[in-house]
Image: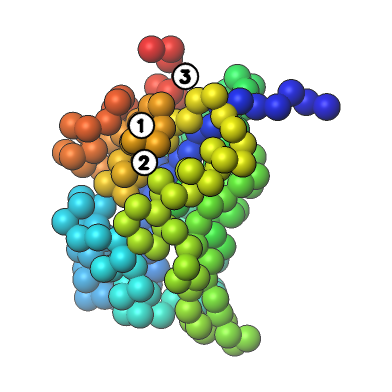
Amino acid sequence: MSPVSTKLICFDCDSTLSSIEGIDELARARGPEIFARVEAMTNDAMNGLLPVEAVFGRRLEIIEPRQDDVNAVAARYIATIEPTAEDTVNALRTRGWTVVILSGGFRQAIRPLAQKLGIDRVEAVDLFFNDDGSYRGYDKEYPTTRSGGKPEVIARLQHELKPTQTWMVGDGVSDLEAKPMVDCFVGFGRYMARPKVKADAHRFIHALDELLVER
């Protein structure tokens, strides 16, 4: 049997493992007006101006994404992967880290990216579709649909895995909420350097392979 890992690292997906925001890409498919509305809501939430729950369901109501739209975003995640992500994840794994994607995005869109990176576990929101592929809803009970959701998921992972270290890497205020729960919160600024995240992070990086530099 392979040794049990004692270290846990959770990565945000949007604007971290990939350059895009998945919800904004879903909105882009509905035209420039809807894209502008949704992008503004996303930025307000990620900058901490609005709670996640104030925009989460509303954005999906505006977009009404189809299953084909979600599949297209899945392909976009892979096309826009952070340049050092694959090598970084592989190196972390060899160093004994359990790697998890922890996102307020959508599991169906993120799963192909996770598979490309060799990440088995995706903690994200499930979307529901009708038989014809039209939008039916989302998992309203999943923690990352609301403020404080990522710390809640991390607490569950820590209880399950009992790691000796926990790190969180992300670009948004919803990621920063996990800081009290982890040994190291790493703010990520390659795509979006948010002032609050930069100011409050234990570390702030602009490429994922900077995680491999011992501090």
* Mark 2 crowdedness (10 Å alpha carbons): few <14, some 14-19, many ≥20: many
Q: Indicate whether 133 appears above or below 182.
A: below
30 or 199: nearer the viewer: 199
Residue 48 coordinates in the image, percent (x, y)? 20, 52
- Are circles 1 and 3 on residues that touch, CB within 8 Å? no
User: What secondary structure is marked by label 2?
Assistant: loop
Mark 3 residue crowding within 10 angstroms, few (<14) / some (14–19) / many (20+): few
User: Which residue ends up furthest to the right in the rendered image?
Assistant: 1
Q: Residue at x 39, y 68 (%)?
A: 26
Rendered location of residue 55, percent (x, y): 28, 68
**Which badge, 3 or 2, is on the more N-terminal residue?**
2
Marks 2 and 1: in contact by CB < 8 Å? yes
- Residue corresponding to mark 1: 185
In this picture, is 134 found above or below 15?
below
Of tags 3 and 2, the one toward the viewer is 2
* Relative side of 99 to 73, left or right: right
Q: Looking at the figure, which quarter contains the N terminus?
A: top right
How far apart marks 1 and 3 lie (CA) works out to: 14 Å
Residue, disc 2? 178
Query: Considering only order in the chain, which callout, 2 or 1, is on the residue closer to the N terminus?
Result: 2
Give the residue type that dot 1 points to.
Answer: Phe
Res 80 seen here: no
The residue tagged with tag 3: helix, strand or loop? helix
- Residue to which mark 3 is pinned: 212
Q: Position of residue 23 (x, y in %)?
A: 37, 63
Tell which circle, 1 or 3, labels the residue nearer the N-terminal end.
1
Q: Residue furthest top?
A: 215
